[in-house]
Every structure is written in C-alpha cells, then in structure tokens.
Image: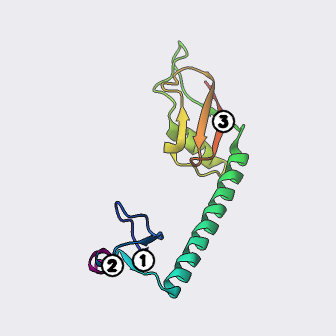
Amino acid sequence: MKVVLLKDVKGSGKAGDIIDAKQGYAQNYLIKNGLAKAADASALNENKAQKAAQEFHRQEQLKENKALREKIDGLTLTVQVKSGESGKFFGSITNKEIAEKLMDLGIEIDKKKIVIQPNIKTAGSYPATVRISAEETAKITVNIIN
C-alpha cells in the first residue's frame, strides 16, 4: 500500500516521502497514529505542492544568505577598548562585542555565528569568520585599538 508520510518515521522515511508499506503496517500503525495518509491523487498533489513550496523557500533563504555574505565579506570593524599601561586589556574581546559592532552597521548576526581567535587581549588586527549558514561563510577583520 502506498502512503505519504506526514511525519518522520524511523526506519521508514521522512515527512513528505511516498513509501510502499505493507497493508497492515500502513493501516494499523501509520494511518491510525496520524503518521501517514493513503497516497491517493489528492494526497499526491498536496505533497507535490508542499515540496515545491519548501524548495522555493529554501532558494529564497539561499539568496538572502548569499546577499548577506557579499555585504559583510571583507568588512573591517574597529573596536576601541581600555587597556592598562602594558597594553593589555581589561578583559578580552568577545563575539558579543563584534556582534554589537555589526548591529551598529545595521547587520544583525547572532553572536554564536561569529568565530574569533580566543583570548584577544592586545591591540592589533585579527581575522574573524561569520557563519551565515552551512553553505555561506564570510571573513571579516577586527581591528582592536586602545
């Protein structure tokens, strides 16, 4: 019996997959528990439309990610901090400060997506990576001044 899975089913498939299941398993478990529905013409058309919509949204998200990467790739940020007589900072520069500097420029990036060298405690220029998505990453430079 052909069914369209409504939810992920371990060992059978992911939501939206059309699988061929045994009659008893399909009727007594999958359909009864709301995990699948019979693969008739309307269900197949609905499944096709959902997959097309998901693909469209995925493509739109990829375009947005690429535009954001192009906007911030190669960007140089300057962060001014207080330091002691020896030039060492009181504390260290974190992802949060870099995210705030990007926010000042109108670019909203989650601080968890910014990867920097640990323990930036002296003035200088440091590379940082911004992971926009699994496919898109941008390189920025952070200049630390006293």
Residue 69, position as x, y percentages in the image: 68, 47
| Residue drawn at point x = 53 percent, y = 22 percent | 83
The CA distance from mark 3 to mark 1 is 49 Å
| Residue drawn at point x = 72 percent, y = 48 percent | 71
First along the sequence among labels 1 and 2? 1
The CA distance from mark 1 to mark 2 is 10 Å
* Pointer 2 residue: 23
**Could you tell me if the residues under marks 3 and 1 are in contact, i.e. CB atoms within 8 Å?**
no
Residue 101's disc is none
Secondary structure category for the residue under label 2: helix
Specify the amino acid type for callout 2.
Answer: Gln
Nearer to us of marks 3 and 1 is 1
Nearer to us of marks 1 and 2 is 2
* Pointer 3 residue: 140
First along the sequence among labels 3 and 1? 1
**Could you tell me if the residues under marks 1 and 2 are in contact, i.e. CB atoms within 8 Å?**
no
Along the line of sight, the residue nearer the viewer: 141 or 10 = 10
Residue 5, position as x, y percentages in the image: 42, 72
Magenta highlight range: 25-34
First along the sequence among labels 3 and 2? 2
* Pointer 1 residue: 3
The CA distance from mark 3 to mark 2 is 57 Å
